[in-house]
Image (cartoon, rainbow, N blue to C red):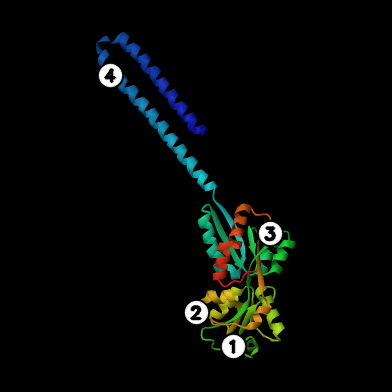
Amino acid sequence: MRTVHSGVVDEQRVGARAGAGARERGVGEREGHHGGGRDGGRNRRRSLAFRSGAALSATAVLGAGLLAGCGSSSTSSDTKTITVFAAASLKQVFTQLGTQYESAHPNTKVTFSFAGSSDLVAQLNQGAPADVFASADLNNMDKAVKGGRITDKPQNFATNVLTIVTPPGNPAHVNSLADLSHAGLRLVVCAPQVPCGSATKKVTSDAGVAISPVSEENSVTDVLAKVTTGQADAGLVYVTDAAGAGNKVTTVNFPESVKAVNTYPIATVADSKNADAAKDFVTLVTGPDGRKALQQAGFGQP
């Protein structure tokens, strides 16, 4: 503002000096050149009009630049971003809800970090910046609370249970939980510290089924990937992941799954840089639109 204002004053001063000079020359001409007075007057008027027009044009250009600059800076300063740490099993439905949130809040962008809940809480407790944390179980949310990263009361928003997935057509003929104990079966499960891994341990232990997995993965999506790429004969994943995979897998439900129901909590992170926007996202997830999307994805109600 100061630069533009100073420029306008300078233009006015230049015009004033030009006008003063013209008047001085006019006096001289009247005193010393009586014969050419008429032509000299016309020339002087043209010169003054040109200088005045130039000064006004410069002022208009500077003013337009000021308005354009002010407009662009206010737009960019209003944009904000929230980062959501979410369990891998929430990837599809949270991506959908993120798009919905951005449509309703055009000046806010949502970015996600999807991984196993145990990995996410470890990152949080090591100081990783985030605004929202959604876990696939209560245990890992409790770790975030004890670590001081979550101070608001977490809200339970969904439940999930396990199912068996196999490559299309079920070539290994897995038809029950007990079949997962067959010798030679390439079984992939989640690692024990991951929510789907703790659920696997509970259902197999309660059912008395001894399993020997060839791999223990850090997220449920990694288990699913091993099955869909033909690296495993069977895997234990959430029903929501099986539904999301569609015809890439064959699903084998088993009644023992009700013995291990995982509850999903969500909360804002204590030191969020955009706490209001973070709370709005939590409200979307726990509200009617969020419940509808979660139900359509196969999640249960808490």
Placement of 63 over or under 114, stated as above or below: above
Q: Residue at x 39, y 19 (%)?
A: 19
Going by the numbered disc 2, the residue's amino acid type is: Asn
Q: Which structural element holds mark 2?
A: helix
Label 3 with label 2: CB-CB less than 8 Å: no
State the residue lying farthest toward the right.
Answer: 146
Residue 277 occupies quadrant: bottom right
Going by the numbered disc 1, the residue's amino acid type is: Asn
Label 1 with label 3: CB-CB less than 8 Å: no
- Say if residue 156 shows up in the picture: yes
In the image: residue 149, left or right of residue 227: right
- The foreground one among 284 and 174 is 284
Q: First in sequence: mark 3 or mark 2? A: 3
Alpha carbons under labels 4 and 3: distance apart: 78 Å
Relative image position of residue 241 (x, y in whole percent): 57, 74
Relative image position of residue 195 (x, y in whole percent): 67, 73
Q: Residue at x 58, y 65 (%)?
A: 291
**Disc nearest the viewer among 4 and 1:** 1
* Residue count near mark 1 (Cα–Cα under 10 Å), binned few <14, some 14–19, many ≥20: some
* Residue count near mark 2 (Cα–Cα under 10 Å), binned few <14, some 14–19, many ≥20: few
* Residue count near mark 3 (Cα–Cα under 10 Å), binned few <14, some 14–19, many ≥20: few
Q: First in sequence: mark 2 or mark 1? A: 1
Residue 15 occupies quadrant: top left
Going by the numbered disc 3, the residue's amino acid type is: Gly
Q: First in sequence: mark 4 or mark 3? A: 4
**Disc nearest the viewer among 1 and 3:** 1
Residue 121 occupies quadrant: bottom right
- The foreground one among 279 and 31 is 279
Report the residue marked by disc 3: 127
Report the residue marked by disc 2: 247
User: Which label was assigned to residue 175?
Assistant: 1
Report the residue marked by disc 4: 42
